Amino acid sequence: MRLLKLVVSAVLIAAAGFAVHRWCWLPYRCNQIEKAALRTTERTLEVGGGYTETVRARATAQRVLGCIEHVPTNVNLYMIVAANYRALGRYEDAIAMYRAALRYDRRPELYLNIGESYLAMGNANEAHRYFVATALFRIGIFKNVPEGAKQLAWDDAFQQLETPPKGGYVLP
Amino acid sequence: MAEGNRARTRFFQALMGAVLAGLAIMPQVLVPTGEDPYRFPKELWVRAEGILLAVVIILGFLWGWLDTRVFARERNVFVLVAAIVAWTGVATIFSSHPAMSVWSLFYVTSSAIIFVATVIAAFRRSLLFADIALLAAVPNAIVCILGEFRIWNPLLTEKEMLETGEWMHLFAGGFLGNPNDVAMLLAGPALASLILCAIVKRRRLWYGSLAIVMLAGLLAAQSSAAIGALVIALLVIAFRARRKAAVAMVSGIVVIVAIISVFLPAMKRKIGGAVTLLRSKQVTAYEIDDALSNRVLPFLVASRMGLDHPVFGVGPGRFGWHFYTYKLMYEERYRTLRKTATNYASWAEAHNDHMQTLATAGFPGYALYVTAIVMLARRSRRTREGDEFLQFTRQFAMPFAAMFAVITLAQFPMELAAPTMMLLHWAALCVAWSSDAAA
């Protein structure tokens, strides 16, 4: 009986150790990785294309992807990976990341970034849909969008805001 | 037999040590190298503490150091805790995104385990439970005061904040990052230290000094919700006191509130806004929103969410995801809300734990929430006169329940690790120290 209790105690302590490592320590490390990755990504986007930036973007995306598994509800992680994918010209992968993030939070920045990615791919129709959603949520945040596309999105968004569609707002 | 008793004593001492160490350290946890240096590390601490205390309690039962009769002493409370965890689990299953809600379930379960461990440990009465809880709040109170006078902040510099245009009052965020969070942390200890000062005559100077520190920290944080909640708690004490004492207390409270209103800019603004609103002939949604610190939209959204999902809510942790759809709907109905200062914001929390519970866990979840507050308040009436522990519970429980009910009308302490742990700790002491009440 005592032996059984000892075995059960050992298993419990080991399970607790695993749980603390998996659900406390790794997310803690990911919090630190997120801060470092954000700085690196900002530098990559500032400097633009180049071999060093490409390598850096690839490494940052890989590192942060590992963290998404441990902290799946952290939208910033998806955005960092997607930003690095965009720096690498992998727009479809970036859009997939942004869409994955939309399941956890519906920030206007996500819609804006998807729109910009579609625009970079040359898909103006899809880009417009996402710019309208951005304008519905937060009109003032367009930065890198061409003036014409911005105006079209605003016009459609204002139309929806003034006379909302019968079935509710159209969100992609 | 003697060895068994020694083992049991050592177990309770270890449990007490673990509970108090957790409470003492957690509000001070700060990770400067993390993207979120304040809230997320504390939430991780709660997870870790919950896991470790669960193992300690299970080992206690396994080795006979803990008796199942301990749960019989406060059966209703433990049943309520189990019901809260169970309902959170049910709401998670029926959530609009269970994979996201499961993390909220984790948080609720960890908090419940810490609460249960505190109750069990505190059955062996000791003022150390109160002392450590008060001392745990002191560093944040002091750092908040230093920040409010722009003397020091652990992470920020005034220059950086001026350059980035951040809200300067964040400098008084203590180790929690936001002065409102600090206020939510200090409210319970402020009330407790005042009551302990009155009851424990031999340590009046000690508790009096701690009360001054807590109150100063609360004023420095300038949270109207926390100050208002403390005032309500003091009025509840006055209401329950004898007439002469009640009159003196109410007069004192009125004078203090008047002084606070004159000298604290945030309170002056709030009262001024409320007076303007009451005197207005035509009131728009924008004006009401401005008077309520831009809370109208999240309040409307949370109540609508609860009505639209009355049984299970939208799921724990899912308020933020659903917010935008409702926001657009209400801004279409009340177009002046499009002018508010926080129009662009996505509210991840309703800033009202009553409504957020309703929105995320439905009416059954909110019923459990209200039951917990009522059961806590009833401790004051159930507890007979007796030693200082019984006296403390008798004087503290009802005002504390009132304070909690009020502060959660405008803030969200139950979504933040440090305020949650502090509030649950004092609630646990009310349970453990009144456990003779049934006799």
Image (cartoon, helix red, strand yellow):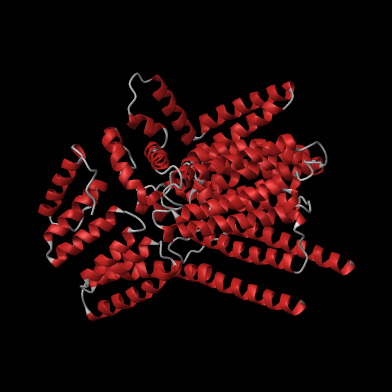
Residue B305, position as x, y percentages in the image: 39, 42
The quadrant of the picture occupied by the N terminus of chain B is bottom right
In which quarter of the view is residue A127 placed? bottom left
Q: Is residue A16 left or right of residue A88?
A: right
Of the pair B36 and B167, the residue shown nearer to us: B36
Of the pair B159 and B140, the residue shown nearer to us: B140
Q: Is residue B62 left or right of residue A64?
A: right
In which quarter of the view is residue A92 placed? bottom left
Residue B6, position as x, y percentages in the image: 84, 66
Residue A119, position as x, y percentages in the image: 15, 62
The quadrant of the picture occupied by the C terminus of chain B is top right
- Total marks placed: 0
Q: Residue at x 40, y 66 (%)?
A: A35
Residue B284, position as x, y percentages in the image: 32, 27
Is residue B152 something one can see in this rendering? Answer: no
Give the residue furthest to the left: A148
Q: Is residue A9 above or below residue B14?
A: below
Give the residue furthest to the right: B2
Q: Residue at x 69, y 74 (%)?
A: A9
Q: Residue at x 73, y 41 (%)?
A: B393
